[in-house]
Image (cartoon, helix red, strand yellow):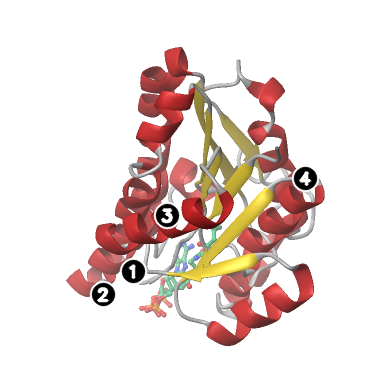
Amino acid sequence: MARVALVTGGSRGIGEAISKALKDVGYDVAATYAGNDEAAAKFTDETGIKTYKWNVADYDQSKAGIEQVEADLGPIDVVVANAGITRDAPFHKMTPEQWNQVIDTNLTGVFNTVHPVWPGMRERKFGRVIVISSINGQKGQFGQVNYAATKAGDLGIIKSLAQEGARAGITANAICPGYIATEMVMAVPEKVRESIIAGIPAGRLGEPEEIARCVVFLAGDDAGFINGSTITANGAQHLV
Ligand code: CAA
């Protein structure tokens, strides 16, 4: 039987490429989205991948949504916590609302996504937890105190989960994408974006598919000894 994968924020941006790549190598994939019904419907039409709408910042919605996915597709073997938002502002201008929105979605959202699937993974003695962090969790970023805090937090989460899950056949790993050609990066003011690209030795933005292939690698049944690690994929912009 095909393994089942859940990808949050899986109908757009990096998540879309992840959902498609997992499907291409044989997973039954469920993709979640928060609000853009039109993009989700188009995605399902084009790919045949079922989408589910819930807010990852809400524990009860996440738990109920995951129960529905498992009722439809079977137990979740691979969970990709990808959903994320930005609310960029220099710290002196950042509002508590901008702080809380990013923490609730990007960080608590990882808890809300992984916690409901964790007991089943422990029982079945198999699981793959993959969290999409960011270069900016590794290096910080002007204007992203909130976002960088969540992305650095992701690395603490996977390193701890890796230790808790290892004996139960569960791995937890992170990917730190650099600047990837998605709507999120295109929303950065053009001048700022140009200066960012100028600082990438590869001389270009990354492609979502380049992150998706890291996910496929970590999700594999034969990736069981890769646990608690971080794949850095940023065109050599920041070396760790
Ligand atoms: N380093 C140092 N100074 C900087 C700077 C930087 N990186 N960026 C801006 N500044 C300076 C400006 O030169 C300007 O200085 P002056 O006042 O002396 O002219 C000042 O900071 C800008 O201040 P403003 O009050 O005008 O700032 P603002 O309210 O317009 O906000 C910003 C600016 C929203 C933070 C904008 O700089 C920005 O969007 N930066 C990009 C942040 C970024 O990289 N976001 C990533 C989004 S993509 C993503 O998150 C995906 C991923 O994982 C990689």
Residue 79's spot in the image, x, y percent? 52, 44
- Front disc: 2 or 3: 3
Say if 224 sits above or below 198 in the image. Answer: above
Q: Earlier in the sequence, mark 4 or mark 2?
A: 4
Say if 196 sits above or below 75 in the image. Answer: below
Q: Earlier in the sequence, mark 4 or mark 3?
A: 4
Q: Which residue is mark 4?
A: 26
| Residue at 39%, 18% in the rendered image | 163
Secondary element under disc 2, as helix, strand or loop, is helix
Q: CA distance from mark 1 to mark 3?
A: 36 Å
Amino acid tagged 4: Gly
Q: Is residue 95 visible?
A: no
Task: Give the left or right position of residue 91, taking residue 167 as reference.
Answer: left
| Residue at 62%, 34% in the rendered image | 231
| Numbered badge on residue 90 | 1
User: Which quarter of the frame holds ligand 1?
Assistant: bottom left
Q: Are there few (<14), some (14-19), or many (20+) residues within 10 Å of tag 1?
A: few
Q: Are marks 2 and 3 in contact (CB under 8 Å)?
A: no
Mark 1 C-beta to ligand 1 under 8 Å: yes
Q: Are marks 1 and 2 in contact (CB under 8 Å)?
A: yes
Task: Give the left or right position of residue 26, taking residue 107 as reference.
Answer: right
| Numbered badge on residue 66 | 3
